Image (cartoon, rainbow, N blue to C red):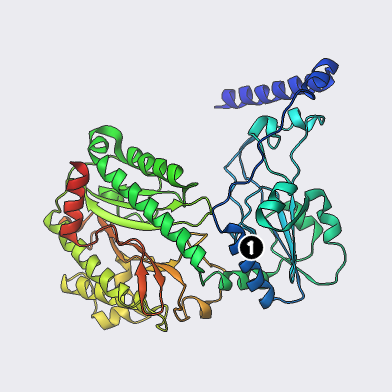
Amino acid sequence: MAGRTALRGRELARTRRDMAKLVDADGFRTYIRDGWGEWDSSVDLPAGTAEAARAHRARLTRELPGKRIALAAGRAHVRSNDTFHEFRADSDFVWLTGCQVEGAVLVLCDDDATLFVPVPSEAHSVDFFGDADRSPFWIGAAAGPKEWGEALGVTARPLEDLANALRGRHPETLVAKGVDPLLDALTGSHSDELRTVLAELRRIKDDWEVEQLRQAVDASVKGFADVAMELGQAVRGGGERWLQGTFDRRARTEGKGPGYTSIVAAGPHAPVLHWTRCDGRVNEADLLLLDAGVEMNSLYTADVTRTFPVSGEFSGPQRQVYDLVHRSHVAALAEVRPGNDYSAFHHTAMRVLAEGLHDWGLLPVSVDKALDPSGQHHRRYIVCGTGHFLGLDVHDCADARQETYQQGVLERGMALTVEPGLYFHPNDETLPPELRGIGVRIEDDLVVTSTGADVLSDALPIEADDVAAWVRKQRS
């Protein structure tokens, strides 16, 4: 390992020396700056992006009138040495702009919005061939201020002008720090108020946002069918990795990619809540827990889970656990309606699960004692919650106050997941042997309507017989 590290260091040093030589080569510098046609720097956005972003900015400035607001898209994180993770723009920034350009910054004050965008290197500059991280010569054509201004209907200026736009202490500047070092250096302290206000505004989705979520869920449904069709190959040797790649390929085809690291958990891995290694075997007798979602190009993501028998038939113990989770899930879905407490679906799901566990003799106390805040014995088998807000982030609106989230009330336009489950680890000696190693979760994506809820993911079956039949159909 030490030898490989040293070799890599020497390779990087050699690359930099070679580049330094090119910079000094008059012939190269003269020849490379001429003879270039126009780059295709057009901006391709989902229909309605500019209009939605404009409406979102208006909602924010109504909440914070007279304040100057600054938010950054952010920067890609270093993966190793001179390579980077794929860039993903800050969600609040995207909600307000529809722009996903690395290094971009929005400055907003009432109706005055200015987007500051990096200017792509031009052929006459050394950065054109010398900046392998940002130059269109190295990474492809990129839009600049002119193209982004036209696409979004906002004033757009070069990023170099940002410092002047942030001069002075009046009006007060509210800034979300920790996203971009340039913005951090130019502004004062971080504003928790700004992040909180944005999170609480984003709880209510407009029609355009709901449509983005619907498209994300529809694409995810295709991905789930793809995975079921590949179960045979997974059993023959591809394992969980094959199925993860299958879903993620669909996510890249239909949208930007997976909205989060896909969870593909077979057999004894299914009780592991965050099984993102996806490196295990898949056997015919296993249950497969698939928790995955497509993120659209707008960055709105689905978050769906189904648990199904690889063979197309549940064993007796698998069916026993699945049916209890299914009863819990259906009862919880019925609680999602406007005016109801946000926590109602959670409490209902937990009661059904606790009653079932008690009937099986798995609780050392009564159901009421288990459900008491000082009890919670049933949570040994479900330590996570049973749902969350959904949107640009898979766990959306996380900066909202408790009284507007878990302790709040459901309103029309809220998007959320409902996802009860039971997780029986293979080494849990409180369980009878036949239940050990079984994990089941059912997760649907919902939007609260004026009368109840629209289950966006209802194209995927949830009743055990329907699930088994669906698997057999896909595998055939």
What crowding class fits label 1: few (fewer than 14 Cα within 10 Å), some (14-19), or many (20 or more)? Answer: many
Residue 322 spot, x, y in % from top left: 21, 61
Q: Is residue 405 left or right of residue 107?
A: left
Residue 127 spot, x, y in % from top left: 77, 32
On screen, residue 237 above or below 227: above
Task: Please give the name of the residue rendered at 82% of the width and 29% of the height, measured from the top-left corner.
Answer: 124
Task: Please give the name of the residue rendered at 69% of the width and 50% of the height, measured from the top-left corner.
Answer: 148
Q: Quadrant of the C terminus?
A: top left
**Front residue of this view, candidates 12 and 369:** 12
Task: Please give the name of the residue rendered at 76% of the width and 73% of the height, measured from the top-left corner.
Answer: 67
Q: Which residue is mark 1?
A: 96
On screen, residue 15 above or below 326: above
**Front residue of this view, candidates 71 and 110:** 110
Q: Quadrant of the N terminus?
A: top right
**Front residue of this view, candidates 206 and 277:** 206
Task: Please give the name of the residue rendered at 61% of the width and 52% of the height, measured from the top-left corner.
Answer: 89
On screen, residue 467 above or below 330: above
Q: Is residue 88 left or right of residue 417?
A: right
The answer to which quarter of the image holds residue 435 is bottom left
- Please say whether residue 424 is visible from this viewpoint: no
Residue 222 spot, x, y in % from top left: 34, 48
Amino acid type, mark 1? Leu
Q: Is residue 330 left or right of residue 466?
A: right
Secondary structure at numbered mark 1: helix
